[in-house]
Image (spheres, rainbow, N blue to C red):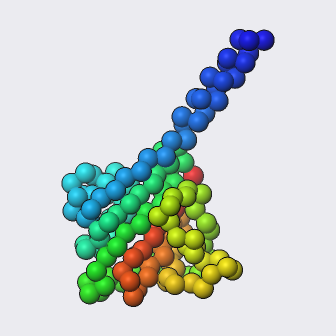
Amino acid sequence: MKTSVNILILLLFSISACSETVDSAYSTLDVAKKENAIRTGLIPEWLPDTSNQIMVAYNISTNEKILSFQYKIAEGWNPLEVCKQIAPFDSPKPKLNRSWWPEDVPGNENSTPRHNFYTCENGESFLAAHPKVGQAFYWNTKI
């Protein structure tokens, strides 16, 4: 009986180790590039050149990620160049959660949308961008 319990405990630890989430932060897009965050797919290659304060949470086993970044509005970045605009309630909620992720992304019935919402990469990812503040949130649904 004791052996069965030990095997069960070991199995539970193995399963929890497989769903590890890694957090990364980059002060600028240039720093992220130097650390290969774009080449490895951690960060989309289409982020604006002025992206900064980039924060990422990435689940190794599911490939799901959430990302936050700021950018200079004066740069004139237009998400429609890479994504398609959707209604605020047409995107799923990410499974990952971090303290820096806003409660109103994606849009929900308890909040008035502050962001413009987009679907990217053939519907596998989503973007919420606040055009007046220069802040955006990106997440994917890859599993």
Q: For the point 33% across and 70% down, which residue is it? A: 47
Of all residues, the one furthest to the right in this rendering is 1
Residue 49 found in image quarter: bottom left
Q: Work out whether 42 lies above or below 105.
A: above
The spot of residue 7 in percent (x, y) is: 67, 18
Of residues 87 and 6, which is closer to you in this image?
6
The spot of residue 107 in percent (x, y) is: 60, 77
Of residues 140 and 98, which is closer to you in this image?
98
Q: Quadrant of the N terminus?
A: top right
The spot of residue 134 in percent (x, y) is: 36, 80
Residue 30 found in image quarter: bottom left
Classify residue 41 as left or right of residue 113: left
Q: For the point 38% across and 60% down, which residue is it? A: 55
Of all residues, the one furthest to the front in this rendering is 99
Q: Work out whether 57 lies above or below 129.
A: above
**Residue 25 seen in the current view:** yes
Q: For the point 64% across and 30% down, which residue is it? A: 12
The spot of residue 117 in percent (x, y) is: 52, 80
**Residue 122 seen in the current view:** no
